[in-house]
């Protein structure tokens, strides 16, 4: 019997799990994929939004501003990559200046600190590659960029080391309230719990509608992106937005937390909740729209493209709290942008709500600190020499594009909730994220995974079930 079962190991689900670990509870996270951060949380802009975009008075506005403030501290506690670079919303027509002023006024109402409208001369000083017709911009100093994998994995690891249980490759098939408790049935097992947290991303409406007469509808909103080589990382210094429209914040151009240049996303409402394919039309749209605000974006340096899905609920607002007419079924639904920024605040908000309902006692042994994987390239020469005495594998470079060593890959596998696939290693270390996109390092990485997990090389996968890389031997008979 669990106190709380959380459906979904994305950034929101893991944030709730970590916050619940502050109390004396038995918590289980169920995830249908083979790892954390395999859905919406793995494919987004990685932007830490300041909080000027959401409508004042909404939960989205409140949790965005709170989450932004929390991430600045959380990156030190949980040791993930975050860069407070600030953002610019660029106004390209003088007649649109009132819309920019409205955005500023909204930000002030939301309590966003450090907002200012800057004119073209100052904008050019900050961003020399800004479009020639740029008039002015809204500058938000508290915005930044984060590694979305790093944040999600850090929250999950810290939750796990504080006693939260995780079950992967466990797809929830049914939820029912029976004899005063919830029964959650997966494709493997049936569990009982006092409370359920529905943090299932684009599938959150499916689970909500199983147990609640007040129906919600989530539409997958696909966003396509292009990622450019690190040689282009300094092309802009801030996250550069255009004035938002009804479909979102539009195509942005931004450095990433690791020094690449990211351009996107598009915004297309689709029916397929697994529809993460990119399209020629979408990528062309990114190129044409991005250059409205930033001129001569060096698209010849694109190293990969990808798409992610945002969980857009019809009301355009976060749905967080006990579902109407239920006893202990808590939604964490409709968590689209700025969901990544808001995640730490969402976790605290929902965990405190559940704590108050069930009167959970404080866990005095909770440890909110976590140390990430050692990065040899960030060490001084003396620190590196000391490390190599004990761990010479930290001197063996496997991924040359990103300078990732065998020691880092080994650590990513043996640490709490360690990697079990090529993508799992990639998200934790960046091995395979460079210019060659795993073209050279994947065979050696597969050998390390095989060795550390004690499985045949033929059983190593790209991303879990159905993604084996080796399908036979060149000595096999045809």
Image (cartoon, helix red, strand yellow):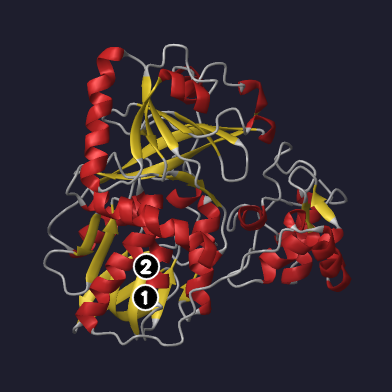
Query: Would you say 389 lies left or right of 79 here?
Result: right
Residue 274's place in the image compared with 132, above or below, is: below
Query: Would you say 417 lies left or right of 91 here?
Result: right
Residue 12 in the image: state x and y as whole percent.
38, 59
Residue 218 in the image: state x and y as whole percent.
27, 46
Q: Nearer the viewer, residue 169 or 239?
A: 239
- Disc 1 target residue: 20
Q: Is residue 218 visible?
A: yes
The residue at 51%/60% (across/down) is: 75
Residue 228 in the image: state x and y as whole percent.
62, 31
Q: Nearer the viewer, residue 56 or 438?
A: 56
**Quadrant (top left, top right, bottom left, bottom right) of the N terminus:** bottom left
Q: Nearer the viewer, residue 382 or 342?
A: 382
Residue 114 position by quadrant: top left
Could you say whether the residue bearing mark 2 is in a helix, strand or loop? helix
The residue at 79%/56% (across/down) is: 405
Which of the numbered marks, if any, corresponds to residue 98?
none
Q: Nearer the viewer, residue 26 or 22?
A: 22
Q: Is residue 270 visible?
A: no
Tell whether label 2 touches label 1 (CB within 8 Å). yes
Residue 396's place in the image compared with 193, above or below, is: above
How far apart marks 1 and 2 lie (CA) works out to 6 Å
The residue at 25%/28% (across/down) is: 101
- Disc 2 target residue: 16
Residue 193 in the image: state x and y as whole percent.
31, 80
Judge the density around disc 2: few (<14), some (14-19), many (≥20) Cα neighbours within 10 Å. Answer: many
Counting labels gives: 2
The residue at 36%/50% (across/down) is: 339
Judge the density around disc 1: few (<14), some (14-19), many (≥20) Cα neighbours within 10 Å. Answer: many
Query: Would you say 431 lies left or right of 263 here?
Result: right
């Amino acid at each position: 019997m669990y106190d709380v079962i959380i459906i979904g190991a994305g950034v929101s689900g893991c944030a709730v799990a970590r916050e619940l670990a502050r109390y004396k509870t038995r918590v289980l996270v169920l995830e249908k994929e083979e790892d954390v951060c395999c859905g919406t949380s793995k494919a987004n802009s990685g932007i830490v939004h300041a909080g000027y975009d959401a409508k004042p008075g909404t939960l989205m506005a409140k949790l965005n501003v709170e989450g932004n403030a929390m991430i600045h501290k959380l990156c030190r506690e949980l040791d993930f990559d975050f860069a407070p670079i600030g953002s610019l919303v660029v106004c390209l027509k003088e007649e649109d200046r009132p819309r920019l002023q409205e955005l500023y006024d909204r930000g002030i109402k939301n309590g966003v600190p450090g907002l200012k409208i800057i004119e073209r001369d100052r904008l050019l000083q900050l961003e020399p590659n800004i479009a020639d017709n740029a008039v002015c911009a809204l500058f938000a100093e508290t915005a930044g960029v984060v590694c979305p994998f790093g944040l999600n994995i850090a929250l999950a690891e810290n939750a796990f080391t504080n006693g939260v249980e995780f079950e992967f490759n466990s797809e929830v098939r049914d939820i029912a309230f029976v004899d005063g408790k919830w029964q959650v049935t997966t494709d493997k097992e049936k569990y009982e719990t006092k409370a359920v947290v529905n943090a299932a991303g684009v599938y959150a409406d499916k689970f909500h509608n199983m147990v609640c007469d007040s129906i919600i509808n989530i539409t997958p909103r696909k966003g396509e992106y292009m990622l450019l080589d690190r040689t282009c990382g300094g092309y802009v210094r801030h996250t550069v937005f255009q004035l938002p429209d009804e479909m979102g914040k539009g195509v942005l151009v931004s450095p990433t937390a690791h020094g690449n240049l990211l351009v996107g996303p598009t915004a297309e409402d689709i029916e397929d909740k697994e529809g993460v394919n990119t399209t020629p039309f979408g990528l062309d749209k990114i190129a044409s729209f991005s250059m409205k605000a930033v001129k001569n974006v060096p698209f010849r340096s694109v190293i990969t493209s990808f798409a992610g899905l945002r969980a857009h609920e019809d009301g355009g607002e976060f749905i967080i709290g006990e579902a109407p007419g239920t006893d202990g079924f808590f939604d964490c639904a409709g968590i689209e942008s700025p969901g990544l920024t808001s995640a730490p605040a969402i976790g605290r908000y929902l965990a405190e709500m559940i704590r108050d309902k069930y009167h959970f006692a404080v866990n005095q042994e909770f440890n909110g600190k976590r140390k990430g994987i050692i990065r040899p390239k960030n060490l001084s020469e003396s620190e590196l020499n000391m490390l190599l005495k004990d761990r010479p594998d930290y001197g063996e470079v496997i991924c040359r594009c990103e300078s990732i060593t065998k020691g880092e890959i080994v650590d990513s596998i043996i640490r709490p909730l360690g990697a079990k696939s090529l993508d799992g290693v990639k998200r934790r270390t960046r091995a395979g994220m460079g210019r060659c996109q795993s073209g050279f390092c994947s065979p050696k990485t597969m050998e390390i995974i095989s060795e550390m997990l004690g499985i045949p090389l033929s059983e190593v996968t790209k991303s879990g079930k159905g993604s084996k890389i080796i399908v036979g031997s060149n000595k096999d008979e045809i």
